[in-house]
Image: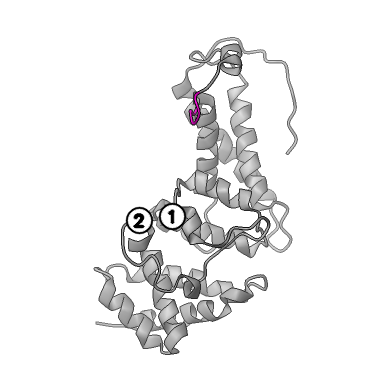
Amino acid sequence: MLLVCRKRTEEEPVFLDEIAHRVEAEVRRQLDSMLALEDTSDPNFGDADYQLAAYAAALRVLTERPIEEIDPAREILRERPKGEIGPVEQLIRNAVKIACDHLVPRGIEPDFWKTLSPMERFYLKGLEVESHSEHRSGVYQELARGFGATDYTELLANTRANQTRLKTSSEFGRRMLSGDGFARSLVRQILFATHQIVRSEQTRDGLNWLKTELPDYWGQREKIIHLLDYLATLRRVSDLNHWQKDAEAANLLAGAVRNDHV
């Protein structure tokens, strides 16, 4: 990312509420321009590049004109209580959130993506990041911050530097099946259903779990198939050998749900 310093010619100040909308538009414009250059067979950008581009886009807007409610000299020099998030920092953090929401994983429908919880989005996007051989902990931290996935470390199988990755269905096992949040999500129930198939080698065990445990199995059937198809694609990713059995189980379960009828 090349940042060019220019003399500011606009002196009329803007308000923070105006800035927020302009930051969102600029982040989306920046990401769309990068995606237009992308080559799926030989990617030009990594996941960290998009995150940094979101920061850069936000900074372009924030430095373009004076901001009415902010005195830059005062903001730089004043002491901040531990944990305080200033208005400028909040705008920059929002830029990363906008980027995370905008960069829908390949294979997930945008409309469906909007219905998922922050932890579900983090997990599914994290799988895509992992498929690109990205294992730096900072990348996953930024994803979690962008999605607002506060308890994301519970989803990680490894947290060591440059070895960070998410748990597979089998690595979750029966953990995180009770309680609120991710434990109650559709993604978690699907992960356990695939684990059931790996464990027993019987596709019907996974299907029975979904039909028994989901309160609206038939109403969510298309969503279930969509998620299983996404997980099934992981078996074709060479860098995800640890996902082979679970992804194959997801493929079998997707077929069973498709052929299931009242």
Q: Looking at the image, which residue is at 33% across and 71% down?
A: 221
Question: Can residue 250 be seen in this snapshot?
Answer: yes
Q: Which secondary structure, mark 1? A: helix
Q: Residue 217: x percent and y percent? A: 28, 72
Instruction: Tell me, for residue 181, which label it has, or none.
Output: 2
Quadrant position of the N terminus in the picture: top right
* Nearer the observer, 138 or 208: 138
When asked about the image quadrant of residue 55, the answer is top right
Quadrant position of the C terminus in the picture: bottom left
Q: Is residue 43 shown left or right of residue 210? A: right
Assess whether residue 251 is covered by the magenta stretch: no
Marks 1/2 in contact by CB < 8 Å: the verdict is: yes
| Amino acid type indicated by mark 2 | Gly
Q: Looking at the image, which residue is at 48% across and 81% down?
A: 249
- Residue that label 1 marks: 119
Instruction: Tell me, for residue 201, which label it has, or none.
Output: none
* Nearer the observer, 10 or 3: 3
- The residue most toward the top is 11
Q: Could you tell me how many numbered marks the image carries?
A: 2
Assess whether residue 84 is covered by the magenta stretch: yes
Q: Main secondary structure of the magenta part?
A: loop
State the extent of the magenta-drawn residues as a range: 81-85
Task: Give the vertical position of 107 relative to 11 (above or below).
Answer: below
* Nearer the observer, 98 or 204: 204
Q: Residue 182: x percent and y percent? A: 38, 59
- Which colour assignment does the render follow? one colour
Q: Looking at the image, which residue is at 52% across and 64% down?
A: 107
Label 1 neighbour load within 10 Å: few <14, some 14-19, many 20+:
many
Task: Give the vertical position of 35 relative to 23 (above or below).
Answer: below
Going from the N terminus, do you reach mark 1 or mark 2 first? 1
